[in-house]
Amino acid sequence: MSLRIMVVLAVLTGITGSPSVTIGPEADSADMRAHPNSVPETAEKTEIFGQQEVIVQEKAEENVMATGELNINHYPARRAAQVVQHYLNTRYGSPYRLLQLHKVHRGNAEDVEDSGRKYELEISVQELNGNTTEKCSAEILFPRGEQQRSPQVQASYEELLKINTKAQEEALYQQYKMNSGLLSAQNLPDSYGHIEPDMKPFWHLSIVAASFVMLNESSENTLYNMAQVANITQLATENDQLKFDGHILLHEMVSQEIIHWKLLFTWSPPDGVKVLQMEQLPHRHDGEKPPNTN
């Protein structure tokens, strides 16, 4: 038994690194094995591991999440930083402004009495369309309690917001506001990772809308990324907003689940993205065709 415990400890100690952003609904099996969370998650699900080995694994997790200075290559810092990405996209994202976590430079965590667990991070965020990166600080509080609540985030990025996208956004808005036909698209990206250039603004727009879901659902035990837009349909509206009905796929990288959500959201250049409804759809088996959300 002691030899088996030593083997588990050796595996846990030797794995570092941070998960990569996923742009498709399936994760390569080699990437899953290399993921820093794969050993703990597998250890919990593997029946050949005895109870003592699982206890050792749990203690190792507790040590990783210890209060104080964080190892930026371990998952607590990365998960908290990913929440900042979702938060920034809900506030500043658009079809031509999309923010992505670039790097975690420093992290600290502490338990806040009767409130939850607070992370203080120094990170770099990249604006993908302008290929501009800015380094700054953020605070994330994961509330404590039996009922899950959205994390509270404080962060701002001044330089990234100076990128002027007004002309592009206004042109896109006018094009689809005046069109006699309504937009309808599926599988962004397709199974080869390809997105037609004229559909990329709607891929970005869907990521911004999905960020509201990912922010709301995030905890210390999750790591969400956008995987695919199964379908998106423009709806008729009599006000100044463009209105969309979408079916999106999210990749929860800890469990390796693909989670389906239906979203109803609006967008206009002055008002940004507003999510009107969000509904998690029932789990489907691999290969099962997603339903139309029209």
Image: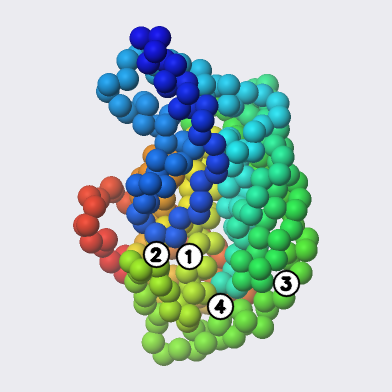
Alpha carbons under labels 1 and 4: distance apart: 19 Å
Marks 2/3: CA–CA distance: 26 Å
The kind of residue tagged 1 is Ser
Nearest to N terminus: mark 1 or mark 4 = 1
Q: Which residue is mark 2?
A: 229
Query: Which residue is the site of mark 4?
Result: 240
On the rendered image, what quadrant is the C terminus found in?
bottom left
The x and y percentages for residue 229 are 39, 64
Q: Residues within 10 Å of mark 2 (few under 14, many from 20)?
A: many
Check whether the beta carbons of the residues at disc 1 and disc 2 lie within 8 A of each other.
Answer: yes
* N-term-proximal mark, 4 vs 3: 3
Q: Are marks 2 and 3 in contact (CB under 8 Å)?
A: no
Which x, y percent locates residue 218? 52, 42
- Residue receiving disc 3: 163
Q: Nearer the viewer's eye, disc 4 or disc 2?
A: 2
Residue 248: name its quadrant: bottom left
Residue 112 % position (x, y): 68, 25
Which of the pair 202/225 is nearer the observer?
A: 225
Residue at the image point whose x is 32% and y is 15% from the top: 50
**Marks 2 and 3, the one that precedes in the sequence:** 3
